[in-house]
C-alpha cells in the first residue's frame, strides 16, 4: 500500500526535491524577491566524460486506482534520475533497492503530493511514473551516453511479484 512521502522515509532511494528540505530559512536572492535553497538535490554521473546531462519532458496519463500487477522495474545504474512535476496533483514513486535484480523485500510505494519532485539515486530500481489524478508533465534530468547502462529494465518473467494496490489511495485532498 502506498504511504505518505517524507524525506526521511524516502532517503534510501533518493531525495525529495522541495524548498527547505532540512528546515533552513533560505538565502535572500533576486533583490529580495525570492529565497534561494542551495544543494537540495545532486544529479550524480558516474560516467564523467562519456555521459552528458539530458533534459526531457514526460507526459504521464493518470492510471486507474485499482490493484495492478507489477510488470517491470528499471534502474539507471550510472546516473541520478530527477523528476520535477510541472502540474502534478499526486503521483506514486514505486522504488526498490537491489543489485542485478530488484530486492522485492525493499519495495516501497510513496504518494507524492503537489509540486514536490523526487530523485532516484543511481542504481535504485523503480517503476515508470504512476500519475493519479491528472495528466502530468515531468521535467526529467538524467545523464546518458547511448549505451545499455543508460537504463536497465527487468520484467517479472513469470515470477511472483507483488501487486500494487492503488485502490487504497484515497481521493485527492481538496
Image (cartoon, grey):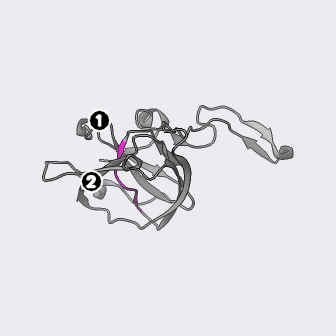
Q: Nearer the viewer, mark 2 or mark 1?
A: 1
Q: Is disc 1 surrounded by few (<14), some (14 to 19) or many (20+) residues within 10 Å?
A: few
Q: On the rendered structure, is 134 left or right of 1? A: right
Tell me which segment is drawn in magenta: 125-132
Q: Residue at x 67, y 36 (%)?
A: 38
Q: On the rendered structure, is 146 left or right of 163? A: right
Q: Number of labelled discs?
A: 2
Q: Quadrant of residue 69?
A: bottom left
Query: x, y percentage for residue 90?
Result: 46, 57
Residue most extreme to the front: 49
Q: Residue beneath label 2, please?
A: 72
Residue 43 among magenta residues = no
Residue placed most toward the observer, 68 or 141: 141
Query: x, y percentage for residue 41?
Result: 57, 38
Residue 126 among magenta residues = yes
Check disc 2 and report its element: helix, strand or loop: strand
Q: Quadrant of residue 132?
A: bottom left
Q: Is disc 2 surrounded by few (<14), some (14 to 19) or many (20+) residues within 10 Å?
A: some
Q: Which mark is residue 99?
A: 1
Residue placed most toward the observer, 30 or 147: 147
Q: On the rendered structure, is 154 left or right of 118? A: left
Check disc 1 and report its element: helix, strand or loop: loop
Residue most extreme to the right: 31
Query: x, y percentage for residue 88?
Result: 52, 60
Sequence-wise, the earlier of marks 2 and 1 is: 2
Q: Residue at x 48, y 49 (%)?
A: 144
Q: Residue at x 52, y 38 (%)?
A: 44
Q: Gap in Å between the C-alphas at discs 2 and 1? A: 15 Å
Q: Disc 2 vs disc 1: Cβ atoms closer than 8 Å?
A: no
Amino acid at each position: 500500500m502506498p504511504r505518505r512521502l517524507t524525506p526521511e522515509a524516502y532517503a534510501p532511494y533518493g531525495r525529495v526535491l522541495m524548498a527547505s528540505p532540512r528546515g533552513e530559512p533560505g538565502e535572500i536572492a533576486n533583490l529580495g524577491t525570492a529565497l534561494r535553497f542551495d544543494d537540495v538535490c545532486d544529479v550524480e554521473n558516474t560516467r564523467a566524460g562519456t555521459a552528458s546531462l539530458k533534459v526531457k519532458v514526460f507526459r504521464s496519463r493518470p492510471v486507474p486506482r485499482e490493484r495492478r500487477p507489477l510488470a517491470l522495474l528499471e534502474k539507471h545504474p550510472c546516473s541520478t534520475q530527477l523528476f520535477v512535476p510541472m502540474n502534478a496533483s499526486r503521483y506514486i514513486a514505486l522504488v526498490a533497492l537491489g543489485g542485478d535484480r530488484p530486492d522485492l523485500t525493499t519495495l516501497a510505494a510513496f504518494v507524492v503530493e503537489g509540486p514536490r519532485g523526487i530523485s532516484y539515486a543511481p542504481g535504485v530500481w523503480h517503476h515508470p511514473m504512476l500519475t493519479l489524478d491528472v495528466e502530468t508533465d515531468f521535467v526529467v534530468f538524467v545523464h546518458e551516453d547511448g549505451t545499455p547502462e543508460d537504463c536497465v529494465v527487468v520484467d517479472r518473467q513469470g515470477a511472483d511479484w507483488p501487486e500494487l494496490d492503488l485502490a487504497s489511495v484515497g481521493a485527492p485532498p481538496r
